[in-house]
Amino acid sequence: MYKLTGKVQHYAWGGTAYIPALLGIDNTPQQPYAEYWMGAHASAPSFVEQNTNHNIALNELIGNNPAQWLGEKTAARFGRLPYLFKVLDVKDMLSIQVHPSKAEAEKGFARENEAGIPLNAPHRNYKDDNHKPEVMLALSEFWLLHGFKEKKLLLQTLQQTDAFETLLPVFEKEGYYGLYKQVMELPQADVNNMLRPLLQKAELLYKAGRLSKSDPAYWACKTLTSHNGNNTGIDRGIFSIYFFNIVQLHPGQAIFQGAGVPHAYLEGQNMELMSNSDNVLRGGLTSKHIDVAELLKHTLFEGIVPQVMNGEKTGEETIYHCPVPDFIVSSITVNKQSIYRHTAFSAEILLITEGEAVITSGMQTLHLKKGEAVLVGASETYTISAGTRAVLYKAGVPKQHA
């Protein structure tokens, strides 16, 4: 059991206050702090404090003895830490994304390797051979796009939006695939002509503060400042804002996003836990590479009802179960009257976001203050206690897969 220091990612869409306040960092320059990574990702591994004079990268520590840290079953199945744990602060909208399945990622990665496409090439789709399911747990009010609207709701959107009158018969005849293919393959001039009147009308309401965040027009207008600064035309991701479910999560609520489900984070702070992968197929709200043919091949073309999770509360812990063997996430709240006791199934990472806590394992005792994280090895039994209220978030591997 050791303290762990993560890696900050300064992406342009990040906020300037939340993560610095969490980590106790002065951000006078107002630099964007978008993500805080805790894991063994090769490009930005966390560092483990084995003693006051020695830090070691987490991927190296685990690589030296995978069975000890991961447990024999997890080590045999994955060969490495199978997840990446993050804090996100989303100020501006992220790109619309779809992630491939494990089998498709393996095929795509091998295909691009055989084609000789460099791993760092901007037009490369598959950076590795892994899938990238993810779960996000809201730390604040959080807004996101998640999957296509059900057929009845999407029909209403197309019927009630003047700009989409030519798209209604496409959807009625060719369904979700035909509709999405149509807008993703439209020439940019046609995108501009279709969306400009919609945005001009909505922008008057947006500037007057008369649009709610549950209205796609609100987010469509927000793209004007965050995604159209290069004057290359109106971002076709605006179609997706109207076609997808807009979901609001309250603190403590979570949502899982599996292979094929199109999604985009819009605004707020969350804990995100995902498989250790960089495979992203983009569909808009980005200046990065968009491979429409590959995107269409892997998108789930059906209406869905977002499944918001409130978690399963057991004593001091609230667990959010996900339908993958790679990870499980939970929140833990302790106070003067309660103690959390647990034996790690595999390597676990815990981050404290409120208060202070003491974590004890065998002869080891670590004092954690807000923003600090700890790594616990497989089969290690530990307790967490606090003098006043403390809140921690934990990432691990599900018991049945560890």
Image (tube, rainbow, N blue to C red):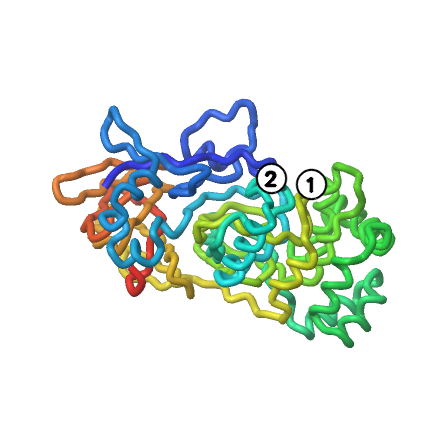
Count of numbered circles in the view:
2
- Residue on which disc 1 sits: 226
Tag 1–tag 2 contact (CB < 8 Å): yes
Residue ID for mark 2: 13
Give the position of the C terminus as an image quadrant.
Answer: bottom left
Vertical arrangement, residue 28 with respect to residue 250, above or below: above
Q: Nearer the viewer, residue 313 or 243?
A: 243
Q: In which quarter of the view is residue 217 placed?
A: bottom right
Mark closest to the chain's N terminus, 1 or 2: 2
Looking at the image, the residue that sits furthest to the bottom is 173
Question: Residue 178's x, y, as percent?
Answer: 74, 69
Image location (x, y in percent) of residue 233: 80, 45
Residue 76's label in the rendered image is none
Compared with 283, 178 (above or below) is: below
Position of residue 52 in the picture relative to residue 242 (left or right): left
Q: Using residue 80 as the reference point, say whether residue 103 is left or right of it.
A: right
Residue at x-position 37% and y-position 62%: 325
Neighbourhood count class around disc 1 (C-alpha, 10 Å): few under 14, some 14–19, many 20 upward: some
Amino acid under label 2?
Trp
Name the quarter where the N terminus is drawn. top left
Badge 2 marks a residue whose secondary structure is loop
Q: Residue at 37% across / 57% down in the picture?
A: 328
352 versus 31 height, above or below: below
Mark 2 Cα shell of 10 Å, populated few (<14), some (14-19), many (≥20): some
The x, y position of residue 335, in whole percent, is 26, 47
Secondary structure found at label 1:
helix
Query: In the image, residue 109 lies at what x, y percent?
Result: 53, 53
In space, the residues marked 1 and 2 are separated at their CA atoms by 8 Å
Q: Is residue 358 left or right of residue 131?
A: left
**What's the amino acid at mark 1?**
Ser
Q: Residue at x 28, y 51 (%)?
A: 70
Residue at x 76% of width, y 71% of height = 171
